Amino acid sequence: MTHPSLNLETLSVASIKEGLANGSFSAEDLALASLEQVKKLNGTYNAIILENPEALETARQIDKRRAAGEAMGALAGVPVVVKDPMDMKGFPTTAGWHLLYSKTGGVDLMPETDSPVVARMRAADAVILGKTNVPVLSHTGSHANDSWAGPTINVVMEDRLPGGSSAGTASAVACNMCVVGLAEETGGSIQNPASAHDLVGIKPTMGLVPNAGMVPLSGNRDVVGPIARTVADAASCLDVLAGWSAEDPKTLVSVGKIPAGGFGSKMSTGALSGKRLGLYGPGWRPDTLSDEATALYKRAQAELSDAGAILIEDPFAGTGFADLREVTPPTPHFDGRGLESIAWDVDCYLKRLGPSAAIRSWSEFVEAVKAEDPFAPGGVLSFMPSLPDFRTAMENPTAPPELPEFMALKAAYLGLLSEVFDTHSLDGLVYPQMQYELPGLHSGEPLMETTVGELNIAGIPAVTVPAGYYASGSPFELIFLGLQWSEAELIGMAYAYEQSTLHRKPAVD
């Protein structure tokens, strides 16, 4: 039985800290309640694919240390989940692929050490419940249907797409197995599942959070961030994840960019007052919204105005910004530029596993998965040979590729973003996260977003926040975007919108 002082739906990082401090419940009580929820619902939603048998003992040790007067980490006792591709010592990293899991006929990638983000969650005294489901090689932002573990189910609408590739993380948070979860985005994989599950997701600036120790799609685009039920909880998790790591040299750019008071330091109910926000339009991307999405977006604009925001129509009009986007064939809508470095990135990842790893290099990886060549026609990464720098990068896959077209594109995006923000004195952008409501789980249709590619290539941050529902019950969300290192400002504005509207409804009892 769940402890009487615990309501899993309303639990937050702050309420857990308070409850543990005043003795309303223990970390063990909370872990037991969370594990009970996993036992009750995971068979339905298939969120967690590898459970952590040490979770309860971790909670008990937290209680003992607290009783002894030890200083506790920022997430002490908070139940969390980890996306499967992130290395966690003692667990195979399967990337959702049966070829990378011994129990489905493949080989196990067993890391000797935690990835930096998992190590930071442990150091913060979070209670890790397990690892969550993803599609093969995190190849899609829509679902996890082709995972060796089977599909993850959307908790809000069980017959609709759950979003991907962090499908399992979002599902676990939405059905109250945990308070926050680790997700990762290369092309929508934080914002899509968060939005599909009526949750908050933070996609950080590239270089703010280390992505070493994680099966890569692109070292140039992959970034780890939190998914949570509230803006405040997501901000608390980002506080733990962010910052320089010697394992990921690009995080050196984050030094001096982390707000002294934390990423929640600008959260207030008045944070939208006077803020100038650009609206979605053909200057950003010519893709049109459905009639119902348009109506919901108009309502959200009224709510933003009521909260004091100043809204600027299509600030990218006439700038040529939309012309930068190119769909990579044969995908219907995905711009994959920047992923050409996959061979180099995977080779670096495998070397980090250690000398006893079952696969230790890119050439060994190719041999291990040759039965299902991901780059071949029909393969999960069949679009990659169409990328402009792919052929050159693959000529010597163990050498760092230069990617000149991607670098020029990134510079062009960042230059236009800076120019538009300056011209219109913008504090941010606020768009509908999806173009229309979620398609069916097995419809074959993708989740159609408004920002994937543009923000991933540019490497700018974004925050999704619940903003209502379609008539069917499908979630409608806003996404706040800003220039590099503007996480605290975006979080503050998302918090003000969240608190002034309180749109989100519990997904489960």
Image: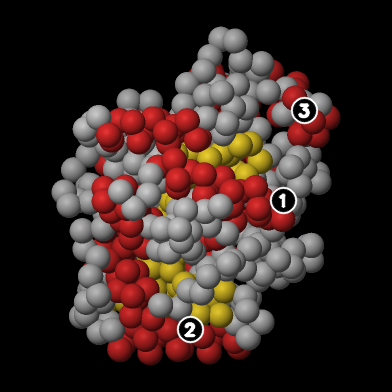
Q: Residue furthest top?
A: 355
Q: Which residue is mark 3?
A: 103
Residue depicted at 48% across the width and 43% down the height: 31
Residue depicted at 31% across the width and 64% down the height: 490
Q: Which residue is mark 2?
A: 297
What's under tag 3, amino acid-wise?
A: Lys
| Gap between marks 3 and 2 measured at Cα | 46 Å
| Gap between marks 1 and 2 measured at Cα | 35 Å
Q: Is residue 470 above or below residue 107?
A: below
Q: Which label sits in the foreground, 1 or 2? A: 1
Q: Is residue 258 above or below residue 488?
A: above
Q: 300 or 332, which lies in front?
A: 300
Residue 185 rendering spot, x and y as whole percentages: 51, 49
Q: N-terminal of the two: label 3 or label 2?
A: 3
Q: Is residue 379 above or below residue 204?
A: above
Q: N-terminal of the two: label 3 or label 1?
A: 1
Q: 137 or 230, which lies in front?
A: 230
